Image (spheres, rainbow, N blue to C red):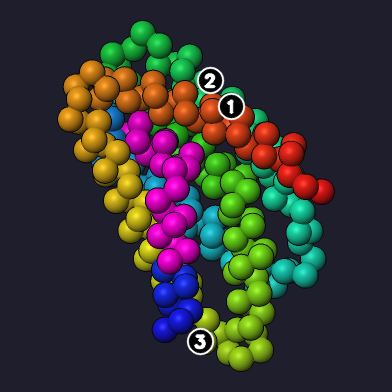
C-alpha cells in the first residue's frame, strides 16, 4: 500500500505540472480534436516509459547519472525549434485550415514523442527513483514493486488529462482567450525550451 500511494502521489504531481505534452495536447483541444489530444498525452509517454523501463531494468548501472543535463540541452533546442515552427506555420491560418494541416498533425505527434524522451524529469525519475525501486524488486521479487508503477500510471494520466481539460474549460469561459489558445501554447513551448536550456546550464556539476 505504501508503494502504491507513493507511486500515485508522484504520478499526480507529474501529471499536474505543465509539460510540453500538456501544451501540445492543448493546441489539439483548441482545434476540437480531443481524441488526438488524448493520444498525444498518453501514447508517446507509454511507449517511451516502456522503453526506459526496459533500459532501467537491464542497463541501470551502465547509464550515466548526469544524462539529465545532456537531454535538457537537447530538449530545450527541440522545444524552441518546434515552437518556432508552429508559430510560423499557424500565422495567418484560420481554425479550419489548421484542422486540415497534415504537417502540423504529424509534427505534433513527433514533437510529443521527442519532448517525452528529452524531458530532464523523465530521466531523473527513472534513474533516481524508479531505478532503485526496480533494484529492490530484483532482490525481493518484482511483484512487490508493481503497485508503485501501477499507482504512478493511474496518478499521472488521470492528473494529466484532468489538467488539460481544466485548461481547456478555463479558456472556453473567455472567447477571446480561446481564440488565442494555440498562440499562447506555442509561445509557452518556446519559453519552456529556454527554461530547459537555463536549467541545464546552471545545473550543479
Span shown in magenta? 9-28
- Provide the residue designation for mark 1: 80
Disc on res. 163? none
Give whichever of discs 2 and 3 has the lower sequence position: 2
Give whichever of discs 1 and 3 has the lower sequence position: 1
Mark 2 vs 1: CB contact within 8 A = yes
Toward the bottom, the furthest residue is 140
* Residue occupying the point 42% across, 53% down: 15
* The magenta stretch spans residue 15: yes
Disc on res. 143? 3
Would you say 80 lies left or right of 146 here? right
* Residue occupying the point 36% across, 25% down: 182
Residue 73 place in picture, x, y as percent: 70, 37
In this orientation, does residue 19 appear?
yes
* Residue occupying the point 61% across, 68% down: 129
Q: Residues within 10 Å of mark 2 (few under 14, many from 20)?
A: some
Q: What element does badge 1 sit on?
A: helix
* Residue occupying the point 42% across, 36% down: 24
Vertical side of 180 occupied by 194: above or below: below
- Provide the residue designation for mark 2: 84
Vertical side of 19 occupied by 172: above or below: above
Predominant secondary structure, magenta span? helix
* The magenta stretch spans residue 83: no
Q: What element does badge 3 sit on?
A: helix
**Mark pair 2, 1: CA separation:** 6 Å
Q: What element does badge 2 sit on?
A: helix
Mark 1 vs 3: CB contact within 8 A = no
Residue 58 place in picture, x, y as percent: 70, 72
Relative depth, front residue between 180 and 85: 180
Amino acid at each position: 500500500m505504501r508503494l502504491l500511494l507513493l507511486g500515485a502521489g508522484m504520478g499526480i504531481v507529474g501529471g499536474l505540472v505543465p509539460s510540453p505534452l500538456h501544451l501540445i495536447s492543448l493546441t489539439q483541444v483548441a482545434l476540437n480534436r480531443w481524441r488526438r489530444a488524448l493520444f498525444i498525452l498518453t501514447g508517446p509517454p507509454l511507449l517511451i516509459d516502456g522503453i526506459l523501463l526496459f533500459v532501467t531494468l537491464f542497463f541501470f548501472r551502465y547509464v550515466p547519472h548526469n544524462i539529465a543535463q545532456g537531454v535538457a540541452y537537447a530538449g530545450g533546442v527541440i522545444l524552441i525549434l518546434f515552437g518556432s515552427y508552429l508559430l510560423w506555420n499557424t500565422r495567418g491560418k484560420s481554425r479550419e485550415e489548421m484542422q486540415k494541416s497534415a504537417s502540423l498533425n504529424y509534427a505534433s505527434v513527433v514533437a510529443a514523442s521527442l519532448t517525452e524522451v528529452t524531458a530532464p524529469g523523465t530521466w531523473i525519475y527513472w534513474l533516481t527513483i524508479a531505478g532503485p525501486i526496480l533494484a529492490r524488486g530484483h532482490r525481493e521479487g518484482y511483484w512487490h514493486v508493481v503497485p508503485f508503477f501501477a499507482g504512478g500510471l493511474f496518478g499521472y494520466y488521470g492528473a494529466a488529462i484532468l489538467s488539460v481539460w481544466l485548461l481547456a474549460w478555463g479558456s472556453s469561459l473567455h472567447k477571446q482567450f480561446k481564440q488565442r489558445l494555440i498562440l499562447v501554447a506555442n509561445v509557452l513551448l518556446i519559453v519552456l525550451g529556454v527554461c530547459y536550456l537555463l536549467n541545464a546550464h546552471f545545473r550543479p556539476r
